[in-house]
Image (cartoon, rainbow, N blue to C red):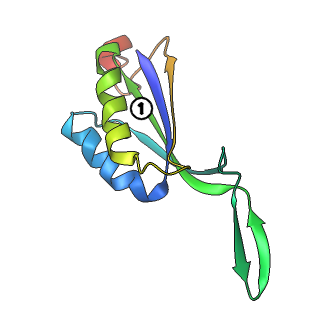
Amino acid sequence: MKEITAVIRPDKLEVVKEALQEIQCNGVTVTEVKGRGRQLGITESYRGRDYKVDLLPKTRLEIIVNDDYVEKVIDAIVKTAQTGDIGDGKIFVAPVEEVIRIRTGERGEKAV
């Protein structure tokens, strides 16, 4: 099992969710976060004064899938979240040792 963590633009959340549903990946946790990468923030003007916004709003998706679903999920996210501009985000993949469904007590791949 793997945990896929994707940090994407907030305005891409709905299309990414739809793409995940199309491949029958329904379990996702969504968190609104702030961060920066190569973009290093932006400069905005307010009432004639410039100020730097160095932490931009992003959306973080956390998805646990069986190993055979990893590439399908990554492809769905990349195809729908990609704009080609700096700030599109990142995807991280990490191993998951154990999953337990609280309601039934099921463990492992059955719990995903």
Query: Residue drawn 67% across and 48% down?
Result: 36
Q: Identify which amino acid the numbered label 1 is placed on.
A: Ile
Specify whether 87 is left or right of 82. right
Query: Residue drawn 40% across and 46% down?
Result: 82
Reading the image, the residue beneath label 1 is 63
Specify whether 54 is left or right of 33. right
Picture quadrant where residue 102 is located: top left
Query: Residue drawn 73% across and 57% down?
Result: 54
Residue 50: x, y in percent? 78, 76
Residue 72 in view (yes/no): yes
Residue 51: x, y in percent? 78, 72
Query: SS class of the residue under badge 1?
Result: strand
Picture quadrant where residue 45 is located: bottom right
In the displayed orientation, state which residue is furthest to the front.
Answer: 84
Quarter that holds the C terminus: top left
Front-most of residues 58 and 47:
47
Depicted 9 relative to depicted 91: above or below: below
Residue 104: x, y in percent? 33, 22
Residue 112 in view (yes/no): no
Depicted 78 relative to depicted 74: above or below: below
Quarter that holds the N terminus: top left
Depicted 94 relative to depicted 91: above or below: above
